[in-house]
Amino acid sequence: MKILTKLVAAKVPRPSAETDEIITTIIDFVAATISLTISDVLASTLQGLTILKKLFDSCGMLHFQHWLSFIELYSEIIQSIGNVTGRVLYECTACVSIMLYQVASRLKIEASVHSNEVDGNSKMILNHAIENDLVNLLCDCLAESGTCLMSGSLDKLPAACEACKAIWALIDANELSSTWKHSFPLQSLQNQLRQCDYITLNTETYGIIEIVTKSFVESKPVQVALFHCFHKGFESALHASLQVTSRICMSSSFACHVICGLENSIENTNNIEGGIDGTIISDIFDLLSVGTSNLKKDKVEGRNQKCKLTNPQVIILNSCIVLATVAHHLILAGKRSAAYILTSSSKKQHDRLSILAYISSSGNKTSNSTPLEPYCASAMLALSSFVSLEDGGCANFIIDTVLALVPSITTMQNHLRLESPEVNALITNCNALLSNWHGQCDGLIGLLEMRLKWGGPLAAKQACSSGVPQHLIHLFSYGFRKYSVQESEKLKNKVDVSLSPNAVMGIVSSINYCLPAGAVYDILFRKESVKIFCDLISDMHLKILNDWNGPGGGKKGIMDLINAVIDLLAFPFIALQSAPGLPATSASISSSHLLNIGSPGGHIGIENKDLIKTIEKHLPQYLQILLEVCLPTSVLRCLKYIELKDCVCAIAFVAKMASYRPLAIQLLEGGLLDPSNVSKFLDRSSPKEVTLDMLMIISDLARMSKDFYEVINRACLLDFLKNSLSHEDKDVRAKACSAIGNMCRHSSYFYTSLSRNKIISLIIERCADSDKRTRKFACFAVGNAAYHNITLYEELRKCIPQLTRLLLSMEEDKTKSNAAGALSNLVRNSTVLCGEIISHGALQGLLTLVNDCSGNGEKVTVLRTGLFALSKMCDHLPCRQFIRSSEFFPVIVQLKSSSDPNIVANATAIISKLSAV
């Protein structure tokens, strides 16, 4: 053994049959002696393991038979792990990690030269490791090491570090050996649009990570072992520990709580302090501090072994990835406070944020227009993740601190700039992946969004003047542009702009903040831009996004993306509807409330007159663009990807589009009023906002044209309207009345079916509803139900007392006008109801109304309607006789002298008819 040790130290052995024989012999010797306790034999056994480790490392010999023999030996050692010394466990585990690193290295070389020839031994070793659950043996090694550490012994800590290195090498090698090409959902969509293969992640890799994660979550010793691996000091162990920790974090929310030190208080929402001393998170910040010192090339005191990092950038990058991943899972768990990572100490919060801020700007001293270094981008990612953890209700210490530390909007814009519009310059600063979850520009876009959100109108104007919205669209445009055959060939071995789902969301949100500052024309009034947003909510992209297990993916990611795109595209409609002094574009009672209050368009002020004029001028152009990109159809299709409770904003946007005839036609062609959709959105289980907007859609379509009556009829919605008239919510009752009124606006098409379904009787009841709005729209519906013919007169007879009471009570002017109009329509087509109109005091009520409103300038509209109703009453003899003998007749005569031509005309008509025989 001494001779072999000296030969190996002198690097004498070379790949050969003799060396293979030496390895085989030593493995057999170790297997035969490993269980012996004789000190001299044990020393020789350890020497043998050391020799094997060095041979595997220096000669790069990866013969499958050697692997099989050694893993069999390692399995036996793990089975009797409690009786094995720390040195033996370390040497054996180190041999496993070295062999796996050799496998990963060879696969990495093959990948870098795009070789189709896979090393047979490497592939067989990897397959054997996966199929025989080597990862479970390595987790057992971690557990044993952690148990010793908990008892106060450091004997097996080196073995834990080697186990971490082996687990990371196994994950790395498995990913490298797979045929999959990692891509974010948007990039996968781009590949499909170009008819490229869409390949998902290797499930075997997830299997390995799941085993490690399960072991970490369920075993306190494993947690302790991993924690102490961060203190070992060797850079390779630190790197592996960070990589394994990041994968564990990606796999489990609970693991993130453990790493923060929150595992005992997950249900206790009052405990909002994490990352305190003694946690993995705290140790990661220590690593960042050491890495920063290495970047500054300062002399660092204490923990000297960790201060000599040969590649601090890699340690920093992986540390920041862990922080960002933990923040993501805390958000999913509802723990919306950065204190779960940064502690509750404002000093510690500031110190930790300052470290990240320094790192984020440390690699770009020469020029702001150069691409971000990956480790700088990762620091930005961590910073933006901490900001995302805050609820955002108002500015706080974390947000204020980050705003003071991060780069300006101009600097961020320089980093976002693509170097050239030419195809050969497609590989830019946005192509690199920081991890399987994060793209290199995620943090930059996240911080930009934060500046725009908290910087107010001034920040948005600065962004627009720097061309930020155009640069953001440019990031999208590379993925959706059409390439010639020659360009496609150039792109064959290139990577497209890689935008993660979080980056996509950040871009959409950032552009939205810029719209009120003038970006609306350059973004929304250009077809190519709107087409991009339409593609983001396309079937193809949402299907891919649904399968994405990282941040911004799954059902929640789909919901967030749909709402963000809708919020952006709805801006012109909301801006016009919310502009001061302009009439609302919708007759809705409370339509699209949530969409309105969440949009920048809902806060357009008087100072934005020029913007409103621009939107008004170009609205027809915008509507045409929406039609050409088939946006109404796309919005309807994307509804199947979100749950009913999450459809509020989407249906609100549909309701806004439905008020424009061209868009309404495309919505109907896309199945908006298919019976299945109607039953879904008007069901009692549907959110109130969805129900209200669906009723508004029906109302708007019916009011717009009788051409829509047939499609409304095919929607089979009368039962739902009937239920809505008896709904416990007053707004639903009012909206249903309005819809029915408009369904009777243009013709008697629905008269018979409304009667058959006993809806008219319910409308009459609503005239006496406890809600004033419902009463107003019920009168409107009654009036239209009586307008076209006498079909419903008999049923409507019962509403005369209610209409009379409304005329004489303390009601809104509009309600009184509607009641007066309804009474006039009840005599429009026949005299059959004249008697009851007189006997129930309705005619007297009209005369009283005219008397009370005459001379009151604020009641002109009600006065006009009342006079018009009396004019219609005068078409029938019984009514003429009653009016002629009324004490209020002189008031009508006096009104002939009014300055209002409408009042004069109606008063003159009444007097003329009363003078007739």
Image (cartoon, rainbow, N blue to C red):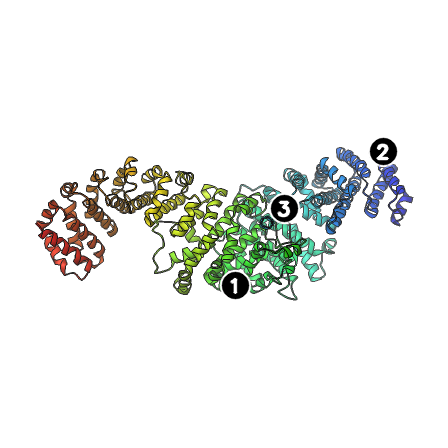
For disc 2, the marked residue is: 32
As helix, strand or loop, the secondary structure at mark 1 comes to: helix
Residue 149, numbered label: none
Residue sitting nearer the eye, 325 or 531: 531
Q: Quarter holding the N terminus?
A: top right
Relative to 819, 375 lies left or right: right
- Establish if 209 lies above or below 906: above
Say whether disc 1 or disc 3 marks the residue closer to the N-terminus: 3
Relative to 627, 401 lies left or right: right
As helix, strand or loop, the secondary structure at mark 3 comes to: loop
For disc 3, the marked residue is: 197
Mark 1 → mark 2, Cα distance in angstroms: 72 Å
Identify which amino acid the numbered label 1 is placed on. Answer: Ala
Where residue 595 sits in the image (x, y, percent)? Answer: 43, 51
For disc 1, the marked residue is: 463
Quadrant hosting residue 333? top right
Mark 2 → mark 3, Cα distance in angstroms: 52 Å
Identify which amino acid the numbered label 3 is placed on. Answer: Asp
Where residue 216 sits in the image (x, y, percent)? Answer: 65, 40
Mark 1 → mark 3, Cα distance in angstroms: 37 Å
Residue sitting nearer the eye, 637 or 168: 637
Relative to 455, 692 lies left or right: left
Where residue 575 sits in the image (x, y, percent)? Answer: 41, 58
As helix, strand or loop, the secondary structure at mark 2 comes to: helix
Identify which amino acid the numbered label 2 is placed on. Answer: Ala
**Can you see residue 233?**
no
